[in-house]
Image (cartoon, rainbow, N blue to C red):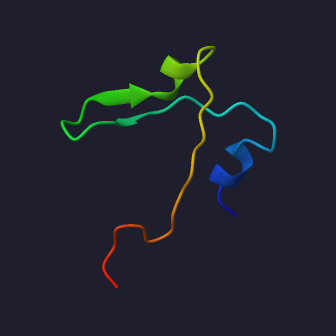
Amino acid sequence: MSTAATNMPGVGDPAPDFTLPGTPDGDPVSLSSFKGSKHVLLAFYVFDFSPG
């Protein structure tokens, strides 16, 4: 069994901070930059923008 599964947050747990490219220019955006000021919804789409 993978150890990553034991480190995943559960329902209601705070999301871990992460940084991703957020603009076409690649400017980074961190989840922590929204803490206390905005709500954030994370959505993941399997095979989004992939051929076929």
Extreme top residue here? 36
Q: Which residue is drawn at 26% across and 29% down?
A: 27
Residue 42 drawn at (x, y percent): 57, 45
Q: Which residue is drawn at 63% across and 28% down?
A: 39
Q: Is residue 41 above or below residue 16?
A: below
User: In the drawing, does residue 24 fall left or right of residue 43?
Assistant: left
Above or below, 7 against 52 in this view is above
Residue 18 on image: x %, y %: 49, 32
Name the quarter where the N terminus is drawn.
bottom right
In the rendered structure, the answer to whether residue 13 lies left or right of residue 8 reads right
Residue, far front:
38
Total marks in image: 0
For residue 15, which quarter of the picture? top right
Q: Which residue lies furthest to the left in this view?
A: 25
Q: In which quarter of the image is the C terminus?
A: bottom left
Instruction: From the top left corner, tell me how far across and down residue 6 is, in percent.
Output: 73, 48
Q: In which quarter of the image is residue 51?
A: bottom left
Q: Which of 10 and 43 is in front in this view?
A: 43
Residue under the point 23% across and 36% down = 26
Is residue 29 positioned above or below 6 on the image?
Answer: above
Residue positioned 69% across, 43% down in the render: 7
| Left or right of 35 in this view: 9 | right
